[in-house]
Image: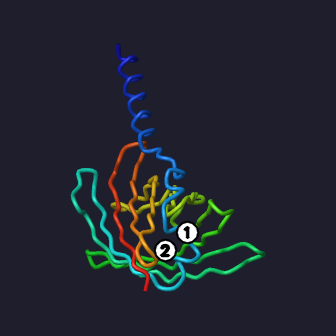
């Protein structure tokens, strides 16, 4: 009986994880088409919040992004310098290096990203998947991010990220970008 309960629990976890596997291709026909090098070029402001798994807003933030792209050996490479100001008065910085692999795929690196972020684009959408090393209460937790960006128009993009650890929801980040 104990083994049956464990098997049911494991299947339930795997089943729940599968519910979030919406294909990026679903958005192929959506307009305007997202081109990361075009949108993330110049200065972008972002306002966001982190909600825990119960939905309570835990932190709010503003992020100022200085973004630039260049050709390196014929490949588009972007640098996003993100400066965060958090509602608790703290600040932080993340420096992304993003490389366009082909018309629909990107890879990204940052100091607090474990390995590479994998990005897939279609239509007005980009989906990033990566592991972020988050300092929490004096420890560092490697947290899975499933990050969806939706281009609304040439100035506005909305971003929604789900955070998970061991397949369990930890919370969500909601973010609105505005290009200057």
**Residue under numbered circle 1:** 110
Identify the residue at image location x=56%, y=77%: 38
Q: Few, some or many C-alpha atoms within 10 Å of disc 2 (few <14, some 14-19, many ≥20)?
A: some
Label 2 secondary element: strand
Residue 61 image offset from top left, x and y in percent: 32, 74
Identify the residue at image location x=68%, y=62%: 102
Left or right of 91: which side holds 110?
Answer: right
Residue 46 image offset from top left, x and y in percent: 38, 76
**Residue under numbered circle 2:** 94
Residue 113 image offset from top left, x and y in percent: 53, 62
Left or right of 140: which side holds 87?
Answer: left
The quadrant in which residue 111 appears is bottom right
Residue found farthest to the top: 1
> Who is closer to the viewer here, 15 or 5?
15
The quadrant in which residue 122 appears is bottom right
- Name which of mark 1 and mark 2 comes first in the sequence: 2
């Amino acid at each position: 009986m104990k083994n049956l309960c464990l098997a049911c629990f494991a299947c339930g976890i795997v089943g729940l994880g599968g519910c979030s596997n919406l294909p990026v291709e679903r958005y192929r026909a959506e307009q305007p088409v997202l081109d990361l090098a075009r949108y993330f070029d110049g200065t972008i402001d972002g306002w966001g919040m982190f909600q825990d798994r119960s939905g309570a807003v835990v932190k709010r933030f503003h992020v100022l992004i200085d973004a630039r792209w260049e050709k390196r050996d014929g490949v588009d490479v972007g640098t996003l310098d993100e400066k965060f100001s958090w509602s608790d008065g703290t600040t932080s910085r993340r420096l992304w290096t993003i490389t366009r692999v082909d018309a629909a795929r990107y890879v990204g690196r940052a100091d607090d990203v474990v390995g590479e972020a994998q990005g897939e684009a279609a239509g007005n959408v980009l989906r990033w998947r990566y592991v972020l090393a988050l300092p929490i209460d004096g420890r560092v937790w490697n947290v899975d991010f499933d990050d969806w960006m939706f281009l609304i128009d040439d100035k506005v993009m909305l971003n929604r990220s789900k955070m998970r650890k061991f397949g369990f929801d930890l919370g969500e980040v909601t973010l609105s970008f505005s290009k200057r």
